[in-house]
Image (spheres, grey):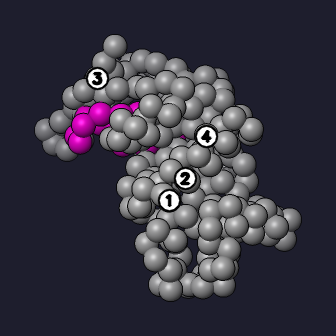
Amino acid sequence: MIECFDVIKEFGKPPQRVLHGLTFKIDRGEFVSISGRSGSGKSTLLYLISTLDIPSAGSILINGKDITTFGVNELHSFRNHFVGFIFQFHYLLPELTALENILLPARNLGLQAHYQKVAENLMDELGVLKQLHKLPSQLSGGEQQRVAIARALLLEPKYIFADEPTGNLDTANARLVMSILQRVNKEKKSTICLVTHDPGYSSLANREILLVDGRIKT
């Protein structure tokens, strides 16, 4: 479970408030969309609840633990074991093949060999198995994004945070990605937090958190 209590986020000097005292919770195994217009604060909120940033005030609890108090090592361990990230941009390492990029989370835990078949199955499902040994520079933008999605799903994380994951994909591939996220949520009980500006994709989630000017619209 993710619980936010009076979460505030400010940037700059003098501070400009982007999020205004948000209080809400996301139940374990829930599929939630975070939606709103550009500048509403949806990506900022995702970064906070995914441990990639810290709030200016308030607290964020995951499984009852306040992640704003985690040290660097504790944060790295939490992310490696429990979190999958999907961004609009793929962030693949250019010197590694598609398969090697997907296996990075497992390599960090010393489990690369154990997860190789899992990685290949994900590549097959996402339609990039033929690109197994190609470098990112040899892949199309859509293929790079699907490789990044396979990397995020490799360890079957308890929490998946996705920031506009379909933004660089055509309609067919975007639908494929959304169907996979729905399946992972249903079969693996992963908690999924999806940032999207697309009402069609937002409606596929169990619940929508709609932000308007940094506040939750109720």
Residues rendered magenta in the picture? 34-52
Residue type at numbered disc 1: Asn
- Element type at mark 1: helix
Residue type at numbered disc 4: Gln
**Alpha carbons under labels 4 and 1: distance apart:** 14 Å
* Residue at the spot of label 2: 177
- Element type at mark 3: strand
Q: Which mark sits nearer the N-terminus, 2 or 3?
A: 2
- Element type at mark 2: helix
Label annotation for residue 215: 3
Quarter-wise, where is residue 41 in the image? Answer: top left
**Alpha carbons under labels 2 and 3: distance apart:** 28 Å
Badge 4: residue crowd in 10 Å (few <14, some 14–19, many ≥20) = some
Marker count (numbered)? 4
**Relative to residue 190, is residue 14 drawn left or right?**
left
* Residue at the spot of label 4: 182
Label annotation for residue 173: 1
- Of residue 41 and residue 174, the one placed in the foreground of this image is 174
